[in-house]
Image (cartoon, rainbow, N blue to C red):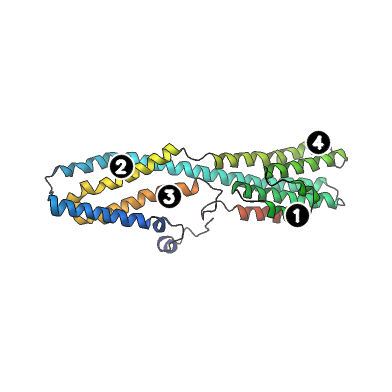
Amino acid sequence: MKIYNPKDWYEVLFHIQKSDTLRRLFPYMVFVALFSLGIAFWEIEYLHLGQNSWVKNVPVMHTLLGFAISMLLVFRTNTAYDRWWEGRKLWGALVNNSRNLALKLNVMLDTEDKNARNFFRETIPLYASVLKDHLQSEVTRMALDETDHPELDSIDTRKHVPNQVAGLMMQRINTLYKQDKLSGDQLITLNGELSSFTDICGACERIKNTPIPYSYSSFIKKFIFIYVMTLPFGYVVLLGYYVAPIVTFVFYVLASLELVAEEIEDPFGFDPNDLPMDKMASNIKKHVGEII
């Protein structure tokens, strides 16, 4: 995720990022500018349309549709941001629950039980790592190779890895209970954090696997395209050749809002503004290591 100073106007205004909408839309903006110039040249030089032409009534349509397209884009952007923010809250809950589980186990486990402590010291942060890879559809074998507990060798990376890691933690907790190293009350106390891992995973999968409906996204793109492509026809009689830069700017604003919504609606990807899951996973590993 891009970290920046919101008070630094100079960098925000003049520094163009790789993912900046201006860079991504530049070829389309050139096309819109040339198209608008062509329409202006055609109407002015060949059709000789003036202020008394019927074309002057076309802007009335754009005025009426402008409100509709603005409402659609506002809803689109808000919906995408809600998905991004929900993903951030879920990963924040994962960080807190990992810490809480580590704190409770640190108190409950015998200080001499090095095997159990090492297991949870490695497995609790491992869940965050494999969940990140699972959401990004990456192979999780690399994360598993960093551990040295034989129980983790049974994990099949072709199946749902987060569920298998959560299952191993529950299995070890149950084994400690059977060995009378944990009481029944302690087992109930730990159940909340253990169950929350799977709940968080399921909620993240819901965001990942349920994109904005295709018909809605497709309609907005077509609406923007038709709206922008018809702007020059009506505004040439009012603006002349200045219609080209003005229509290009309108296209930049409308298309940028759609691009921003596309980028943040899936917060678990590799885009610069997606969630910093690598950083949060490393923080979990660091904090759990400090606690247990």
Q: Earlier in the sequence, mark 2 or mark 4?
A: 2
Please state the horizontal and vertical placement of residue 8, each as a whole percent of the image.
Answer: 45, 62
Q: From mark 1 to mark 4, how far is it between C-alphas? A: 30 Å
Q: From mark 1 to mark 3, how far is it between C-alphas? A: 40 Å
Indicate the secondary structure of the residue bearing disc 4: helix
User: Which residue lies under the disc numbered 2?
Assistant: 66
Q: Seen from this angle, which residue lies furthest front?
A: 158
- The amino acid marked with disc number 4 is Asp
Q: Nearer the viewer, residue 63 or 290?
A: 63
Q: Earlier in the sequence, mark 1 or mark 2?
A: 2
Please state the horizontal and vertical placement of residue 270, each as a whole percent of the image.
Answer: 54, 53
The relative height of residue 80 versus residue 11 in the rendered view (above or below) is above
User: Which residue lies under the disc numbered 4?
Assistant: 185
- The amino acid marked with disc number 3 is Leu
Residue 182 in sight here = no
Q: Earlier in the sequence, mark 1 or mark 3?
A: 1
**What residue is drawn where x is 78% and y is 55%?**
148
Indicate the secondary structure of the residue bearing disc 2: helix
- The amino acid marked with disc number 2 is Gly
Which numbered mark, 1 or 2, is in the foreground of this view? 1
Give neighbour class at mark 2: few <14, some 14-19, many 20+ (Cα, 10 Å): few
The reply to whether the C-beta atoms of the residues labelled 2 and 4 are less than 8 Å apart is no
Q: Quadrant of residue 160?
A: top right
User: Which residue lies under the disc numbered 1?
Assistant: 147
Q: Nearer the viewer, residue 81 or 215?
A: 215
**What residue is drawn where x is 80% and y is 43%?**
172
Number of on-image labels: 4
User: Which residue lies under the disc numbered 3?
Assistant: 259
Q: Nearer the viewer, residue 54 or 81?
A: 54
Q: Nearer the viewer, residue 257 or 147?
A: 147
